[in-house]
Image (cartoon, rainbow, N blue to C red):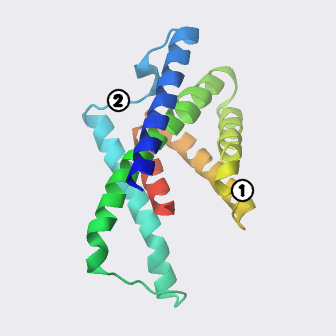
Amino acid sequence: MIIDGLINAIMNLTFFGIVVLIRNYYHKEGLDSFLIHWDKRGIRLFLEGLIVGIVLIGLYPVLITMFGLGRLTFDITKIHSTIILLLVHGLGYLAVAVFEEALFRGYIFIKLVNRFSVPTALGISSIIFGGLHFMTYSDSPYFLIGLINATLIGVLLCIVVIKTKSLMLAIGYHLTWNLGQK
């Protein structure tokens, strides 16, 4: 499991590097053109994305418990392995969030907005994002729901990028979304 998380991180950081190189080569644009910034505002937006993601994902077990459809249990003896998994997969999913947000919102969406209207760019990039999650949900009995879900998350994250002019909140939210599905 630890190796899987590290391989995931390395692969996605490599993919991100390739996207940066392609953008630099074809468009003569650097890393700053991806709307990724680790200044004070960027860190604040990233943390806001994490918090929003934790709250929204945390609502699910609370609602399930409130409506009597399930119950929450906590085993303190497994906290150590949970923390290790969270850290390792957190690193891997952070790399996934950076890569996917840079590609779909920081590159594809931004380029489409420069060429088409915002709604058209939002629709095209979100459908591509949802469609490319085909393999993620292909073994699931909820395949269609998964694709629709990914597409709607793509729409939401495009709106976040439009409103904040940054990928940082989207990256934070994307990270917690992926961790919540693990």
User: Which residue does the image show at 60% across and 45% down from the upper left?
Assistant: 154
User: Which residue does the image show at 40% across and 57% down from the upper left?
Assistant: 52
> How many numbered discs?
2
Residue 60 higher or lower than 175, as above or below:
below
Task: Provide residue 145's location: percent of width, then percent of height.
Answer: 70, 62
Task: Provide residue 119's location: percent of width, then percent of height.
Answer: 68, 37
User: Which residue does the image show at 47% across and 24% down from the upper left?
Assistant: 17
Tag 1 residue: 138
- The residue lying toward the viewer, choosing from 42 and 96, is 96
Secondary structure beneath disc 1?
loop
Question: Position of 139 compared to 14: left or right?
Answer: right
Question: Position of 117 compared to 107: left or right?
Answer: right
Tag 2 residue: 37
Q: Amino acid at mark 2?
A: His
Task: Provide residue 163's location: percent of width, then percent of height.
Answer: 48, 39
- The residue lying toward the viewer, choosing from 148 and 15, is 15
